[in-house]
Image: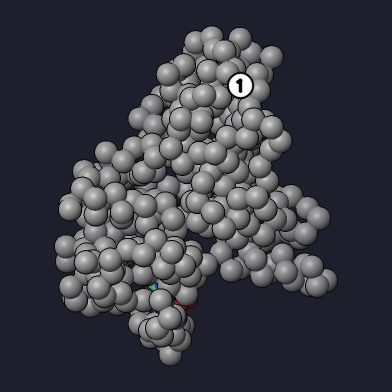
């Protein structure tokens, strides 16, 4: 039996932690729900029972807890994850705060589960678009990854309730208050902040996290990340240059053998197809005739489930398996 804290329980990912924990029926003895001062007096329902939302503070981890699932933003994670870890709690953190720390494993259970066990109290959950992208890339490793080009089509749920509210507001004729421009009937090549080199932080995250998870620190990789007016489900068009020649059927077989991935040989997956499930779907697998060993893939996943809450809980399950 485990004791679990959910930090950021009132947020979009926090609420999905609750849904996924209920679905997976993990052996939870005690569970606590934490958020900010703003949520004082609120309750959440878990397995049919109502729980108060408690205010996160320095003493939140003084109680016996085994795991803390964090999704309350980078600043909260930076401050409170080390406090939790110092109390012997294993933190699985959905923010970007710890992902590139060399002492913190960055884990997708279908790709690098072995990294999870080497933690020092904090494990990072990768960026949503990165999680769904490295799953098919892992299957392509036998052919050697020479260069990867990502183009993303990211849903507004990736920005939490603020993003969803903006799309809803635009649908009822109101302006955006979170996004810098109207998101309805539009696409915004602007996710997270701009960096001095002209890339966005989201694009930098995809490149750096892909290298770390796949264990390929010098992989040539680039990304353009775009917010689209879709409520839920991220899509990524991946262009890959492989080192070795390939038969397309062998590639399809390798993708089909990859854990966590569903391959469509006919048709193609869309955000509505994947919303509410944990499998990543890939379709439109085809040669890129402009390169010697080029391949194009269309990869879709539920960014709040596999891209955030479910991946974190699957990391926790892996650790529970190792410890049992
Ligand atoms: P709250 O609802 O009390 O503000 P989202 O990503 O959907 O915006 O959700 C963010 C989550 O992180 C919410 O649960 C929010 O709680 C929580 N959160 C934000 N800042 C803090 C903080 N300083 N301490 C604790 N929880 C926080």
Task: Decide if residue 60 is on the left or right side of residue 135.
Answer: left
Could you say which is closer to the camera, residue 231 or residue 279?
A: 279
Residue at (49% x, 10% y) in the render: 244
> Residue 149 at x, y = what percent?
58, 29
Q: How is the image coloured?
A: one colour
Which residue is tagged 1?
A: 295
Task: Decide if residue 184 is on the left or right side of residue 137.
Answer: right
Could you say which is closer to the camera, residue 261 or residue 171?
A: 261
Could you say which is closer to the camera, residue 177 or residue 55?
A: 55
Task: Decide if residue 214 is on the left or right side of residue 169.
Answer: left
Could you say which is closer to the camera, residue 246 or residue 70?
A: 246
Q: Is residue 207 visible?
A: no
Residue at (54% x, 12% y) in the render: 246
Quadrant of the frame with the N terminus: bottom left
Position above or below: 311 against 64: above
Q: Is residue 112 visible?
A: yes
Position above or below: 137 against 236: above
Report whether the residue tagged 1 is closer than 8 Å to ligand 1.
Answer: no
SS under mark 1: strand
> Residue 86 at x, y = what percent?
17, 63
Position above or below: 288 against 154: above
Position above or below: 78 against 51: above
User: Furthest residue to the bottom?
Assistant: 41
- Residue 148 sits in which quadrant? top right
Ligand 1: image quarter: bottom left
> Residue 189 at x, y = what percent?
68, 46
Residue at (56% x, 24% y) in the render: 252
Residue at (47% x, 48% y) in the render: 127
Other residues around mark 1 within 10 Å, as few (<14) / some (14–19) / many (≥20): many
Number of numbered discs overlaid on the protein picture: 1
Task: Decide if residue 16 is on the left or right side of residue 32.
Answer: right
């Amino acid at each position: 039996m485990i004791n679990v804290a959910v930090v950021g329980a009132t947020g979009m990912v926090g609420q999905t932690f609750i849904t996924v924990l209920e679905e997976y029926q993990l052996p939870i003895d005690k569970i606590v729900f934490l958020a900010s001062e703003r949520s004082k007096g609120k309750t959440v329902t878990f397995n049919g029972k109502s729980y108060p939302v408690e205010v996160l503070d320095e003493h939140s981890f003084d109680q016996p807890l085994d795991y803390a699932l964090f999704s309350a933003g980078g600043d909260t994670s930076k401050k409170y994850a080390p406090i939790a870890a110092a109390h012997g709690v294993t933190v699985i953190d959905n923010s970007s705060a710890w992902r590139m720390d060399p002492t913190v494993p960055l884990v997708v259970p279908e790709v690098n589960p072995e990294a999870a066990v080497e933690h020092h109290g904090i494990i990072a959950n990768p960026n949503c678009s990165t999680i769904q992208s490295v799953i098919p890339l892992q299957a392509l490793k036998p052919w050697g990854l020479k260069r990867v080009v990502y183009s993303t089509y990211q849903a507004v749920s990736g920005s939490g309730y603020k993003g969803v509210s903006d799309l809803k507001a635009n649908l009822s004729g109101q302006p955006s208050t979170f996004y810098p421009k109207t998101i309805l009937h539009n696409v915004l090549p602007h996710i997270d902040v701009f960096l001095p080199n002209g890339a966005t932080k989201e694009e930098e995250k995809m490149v750096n996290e892909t290298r770390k998870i796949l264990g390929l620190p010098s992989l040539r990789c680039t990304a353009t990340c775009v917010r689209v007016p879709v409520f839920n489900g991220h899509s990524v068009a991946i262009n890959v240059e492989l080192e070795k020649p390939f038969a397309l059927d062998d590639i399809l077989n390798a993708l089909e053998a990859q854990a966590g991935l569903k391959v469509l040989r006919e048709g193609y997956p869309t955000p509505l197809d994947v919303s509410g499930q944990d499998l990543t779907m890939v379709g439109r697998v085809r040669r890129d005739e402009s390169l010697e060993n080029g391949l194009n893939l269309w990869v879709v996943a539920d960014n709040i489930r596999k891209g955030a809450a479910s991946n974190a809980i699957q990391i926790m399950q892996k650790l529970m398996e190792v410890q049992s």
